[in-house]
Amino acid sequence: MAKLGFVGLGVMGGGIARRLLDAGHELVGYNRTKEKARALIEAGMSWCDSPREAAERSDVVFTMVTNVAALRAVADGADGILAGLGPGKVYVDMSTVGPAASRELAQRVRETGAEMLDAPVSGSVATLEEGRLSVMVGGDTATFERVEPILRDVGPKVTRVGEHGQAALMKIASNLQLAVQMLAFSEGVLLAEKGGIEREVAVEVLTNSAIASPMVKYRGPFVLEQPEEAWFDVNMMQKDMNLALELGRELNVPLPTTAVTNELLTAARGMGLAAKDFAVLFDTLAAMAGVETRLGA
Ligand SMILES: NC(=O)c1ccc[n+]([C@@H]2O[C@H](COP(=O)([O-])OP(=O)(O)OC[C@H]3O[C@@H](n4cnc5c(N)ncnc54)[C@H](OP(=O)(O)O)[C@@H]3O)[C@@H](O)[C@H]2O)c1
């Protein structure tokens, strides 16, 4: 079995690392904030003092960090992943970043003699824990075939979508729909509520109707009660919407519903809700409709 390394043990990275450990893989790992890795260390993950060490001590090293700035922070420099790569090794980045940044990184990885795959995931904390995450992969076929069995231990649906950066593109094409759906769901709930239907009833009906995607099923109820910790906060959601809008401009694809929803995310930030789960799109729209929510009208 290949030795695995994992850098970025936040909500998603920590959960994926846990699945890899549970599947019996030998795992080493690093996180900027060591405290967050404590449970994984207790479960058998061996701690590394730097991303470089995680790359040096593994055959396949993964990253799952916030954005491009975070990716550069763990990949570059004397203690970065690139410094620990070499021929025969594979670097798999699972973070959601733009395709251009991902392709540029793949080129730099190649220069070390190693191979890279972009492998962002679709799903949430709940999907991850249930073992139902889907993984999109970009990169060459031979490297994909080497890593695919490991990715199947993360989630059952692993799809190679094309060359370097194509999975990053696919992920953004998928993610823009999360916020758009959440806004449309909020419109439906508010319309029903202002017309006299109880919010709980509207949520119950909609989450069991034809519009109930897996995301609407698990996030829809957040309009009744926000989770204590955001599953995916407004800032992170807006990062992906901005990536989508940039790509839309580049590829000449109008993204009207993405643009409108992005403005509502900006409004949410203006209301001081940036760290809340992006389901606060509901509260943002409710404020415009003069409807009181748990956050106030
Ligand atoms: N949450 C979801 O539902 C979901 C679903 C699919 C994809 N994603 C994607 O998964 C990625 C991670 O999201 P998450 O929800 O796991 O976020 P998270 O819990 O905030 O974790 C972010 C990780 O990035 C690290 N990081 C951030 N800035 C860094 C820096 N400058 N240097 C080193 N490490 C840095 C954090 O380290 P610290 O612990 O030290 O802060 C942490 O390990 C994002 O690209 C997101 O778009 C998330």
Image (cartoon, rainbow, N blue to C red):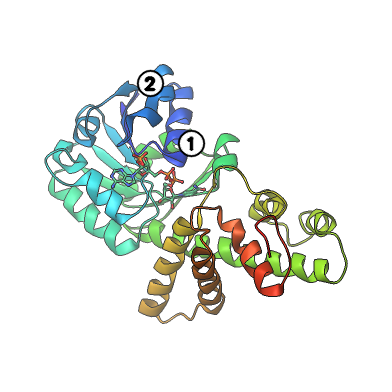
Q: Is residue 75 left or right of residue 222?
A: left
The residue at which mark 1 appears reads as 154
| Residue at the image point whose x is 33% and y is 29% from the top | 34
The nearer-to-camera label among 1 and 2 is 2
Q: CA distance from mark 1 to mark 2?
A: 19 Å
Callout 1 crowding tier (Cα within 10 Å): few <14, some 14–19, many ≥20: many
Decide which of 144, 50 is in the foreground and name it.
50
Q: Position of residue 283 (x, y in %)?
A: 65, 62
- Determine whether the beta carbon of the residue marked 2 sits less than 8 angstroms from the nearest atom of ligand 1: no
Locate the C terminus and report the quarter of the image it occupies: bottom right
The residue at which mark 2 appears reads as 41
Residue 117 vertical placement versus 49 (above, below):
below
Q: In the structure shown, which secondary structural element does the residue marked by tag 1 occupy?
A: loop
Decide which of 216, 263 is in the foreground and name it.
263
| Residue at the image point whose x is 39% and y is 72% from the top | 247
Q: Amino acid at mark 1?
A: Val
Locate the N terminus and report the quarter of the image it occupies: top left
Circle nearer the N terminus (1, 2): 2
Q: Amino acid at mark 2?
A: Ile
Decide which of 167, 289 is in the foreground and name it.
289
Q: Position of residue 65 (x, y in %)?
A: 36, 46
